[in-house]
Image (cartoon, rainbow, N blue to C red):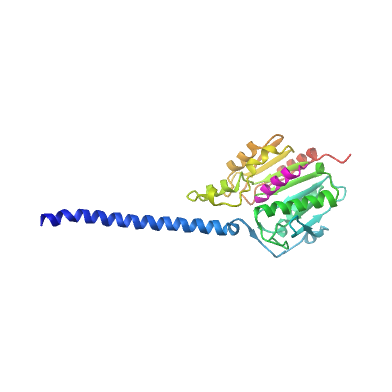
Amino acid sequence: MAEEQRSRPAARTWSWRTRAMRVGLIVLLTDAGVCVFVALLQAKLIYFPSREYHSTPADVGLEFEDLTLSTSDGLGISAWYVPRQKANGTVIFCHGNAGNMADRLFVIQLFHKLGYNLLMFDYRGYGGSEGRPDEEGTYLDAAAAWDYVAEIKKEPPSRIALVGRSLGGAVAIDLALRHPPGALVVEATFTSLADVGRLHYPLLPVGWLLRYRYDSLDKVPHLTCPKQFYHGREDGLIPIENGRRLFEAAAAPKEFIETPGDHNSAGFAWASEYTDGLAEFLRVSLRPTP
C-alpha cells in the first residue's frame, strides 16, 4: 500500500509534464503557421490596390494627359499628367499603399492651385497598371515617372519636386536617391517597413520574415536636396516618433512639421497654414530655369 501511494505523485508529475509539452507544441506549431502565413502572403498584407477609376481630373475641371508609362522591366504603368500654365516646376506624386490615383484628386487640385504641373502614377497592380506590386517594382514604376518628366517633358531636375505619402514616401525617398530632385516632401512616412511591423506585431520575428524592406532610414542620410517631413500627432499606424527618427537621420537641409490629425488626415493639406508652408518651401527650393 505504501509503495502504491509513493507512485502517485510521480504519475501526476508526468501527467502535468505531458500536458505542458503538448501545449508548448501547439503554441510552437501555431506560431510557425502564422510565420509561414505572413511570409507567403505578405504582399497582400502590404498592398491594397483598387483597379477601378471612379473619377479623373476632368471631374474637377482639370485638363490632363492619360498616359501609359513604360518601365525598365517592360510593364505599362498608368499615369496622369496635369499641366499648369506658367508652371513653377513639376511635382511627381507617389501615393500610399491603398486605392489608386482616383482617390487623390484633392492632391492634384492642391498642386495645380499652387502653380505646378503634376504627374501622378499608379504602381504596378494598381488602377490600370500592369503586373503585381512588390518593393523593387514600385521603385521601377517611380523611375518611369521620373523619366517621363525629365526626358519627355524636359523638366530640369532642379525644378522637380518628389512628394510621397506613407508607403509613397519610401518610394519617393528611393527615387530621390537614384535621381536627385530639387526638393523632397514626405508625409506620414516610416523609417522602414520592418520597424512598423515590429510595432504592430511585437511577438513575430518581423525582421526575419519580411522580404519587402522599404528601408528609408538607410537612404535619407545620403539625400542632399531640401527636405520637408510632415507627420500627424494622432497617427496610430505610423506613430510620430517613427517619423521623427526618419527626420533625425536625414541630412540637412531639412524641416519637420508636426500637424494635427491621424494617418489619413494629417499633413500639408490639414489647414491653410501648412499648405502655405509647403508653397514657400517649394518656391525657395525649386530653382527657376536660367
Question: Total of numbered circles in the picture?
Answer: 0
In this view of the protein, which residue sits in the foreground, 15 or 265? 15
Residue stretch in magenta: 167-181
Say which quadrant the N terminus sits in. bottom left
Q: Is residue 92 visible?
A: yes
Q: Is residue 18 left or right of residue 66?
A: left
Please provide percent x and percent y for residue 196.
57, 48
Q: Position of residue 257 (x, y in %)?
A: 67, 40
Residue ID at (59%, 52%): 211
The kind of secondary structure the magenta stretch mainly shows is helix
Asked whether residue 136 is drawn in magenta, I would say no
Name of the residue lying farthest toward the right: 290
Which quadrant would the C terminus be assigned to in this image?
Answer: top right
Residue 177, magenta (yes or no) = yes
Placement of 283 over or under 24, stated as above or below: above
What residue sits 20% from the left and 53% below the top? 9
Q: Position of residue 73 (x, y in %)?
A: 73, 57
User: Residue 95 location in percent, x, y?
Assistant: 69, 53
Q: Report the front residue among 175 and 164.
A: 175
